[in-house]
Amino acid sequence: MKSVVLFSGGLDSTTALAMAIARGDEVYPLTISYGQRHRVEIEKARRTLDRYRLADRAREISFDLSFLHSSALTDRSLAVPRHSVDAIPVTYVPARNLIFLSLAAAYAEDIGAERIIIGVNAVDFSGYPDCRPAFIEAFERAVRSGTKAGDRLAVEAPLIALSKKEIVELGVGLGVDHALTHSCYDPAPDGAACGTCDSCRLRIKGFAEAGIGDPARYVAR
């Protein structure tokens, strides 16, 4: 069965990719470069795809979302928060997963894939509205009513109800090379993770709770 996997090179998307491979899917990874400040994740994604020998089947799309000035991931003049906030943080990119899933749906329909897989998580996450089950379910309904593929195309979010601890443990069981994954929103010029942004803190917490060493390289503190 053909599956399009949205693949950023991060902890979650790499685990989702490994799950699809282990299940025996014919995987077509789709990586999207959108002008994000943490573009180092794209290079990590390429290295993981080489490891799985999927580079020849992978697709990489580049487009510029820097016109979105409300997100610190697309507007470098905004600071990435170093602490938790009660509201949706400034690292939220407006409609990012809606855009990404729409591209994945077009690609899936084009190649005759039957699944779109996205590694969103709604347990240990930053509160982004496009990571919640209700959004994934609504998008699947939209795909089925608005594409020629119709009910033949499913949208899966296999990690959505897992904690970061569970995702780390699952990745270990699947043989994921966590050293190749990237989580930081504001890495140093040499690619080292900041260790203090929301994404870093969630990753550090997940590895600590799993009792597994985090192989990510962090800036000296």
Image (cartoon, grey):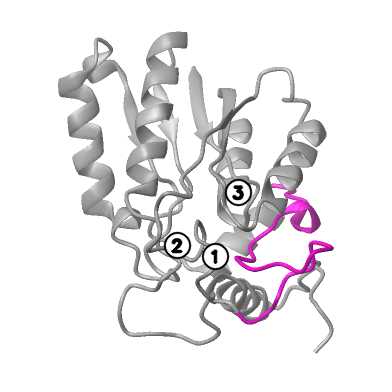
The residue tagged 3 is 15
Of pointers 3 and 1, the one earlier in the residue sequence: 3
The amino acid sitting under disc 1 is Glu
Q: CA distance from mark 2 to mark 1?
A: 6 Å
Of residues 201 and 34, which is closer to you in this image?
34
Asked if the magenta segment contains residue 146, the reply would be no
The residue tagged 2 is 162
| Part of the protein shown in magenta | 174-196
The residue tagged 1 is 166
Q: Residue furthest left?
A: 145
The amino acid sitting under disc 2 is Leu
Whether residue 95 is visible here, answered yes or no, is yes
Measuring from the top left, give residue 160's x and y in whole percent. 39, 55
Measuring from the top left, give residue 131's x and y in whole percent. 35, 56
Which class describes the residues within 10 Å of circle 2: few (<14), some (14-19), or many (20+)?
A: some
What residue is drawn where x is 71% and y is 67%? Answer: 187
Task: Between label 3 and label 1, give the one nearer the viewer.
Answer: 3
Which class describes the residues within 10 Å of circle 1: few (<14), some (14-19), or many (20+)?
A: some
Q: Name the image quarter holding residue 170.
A: bottom right
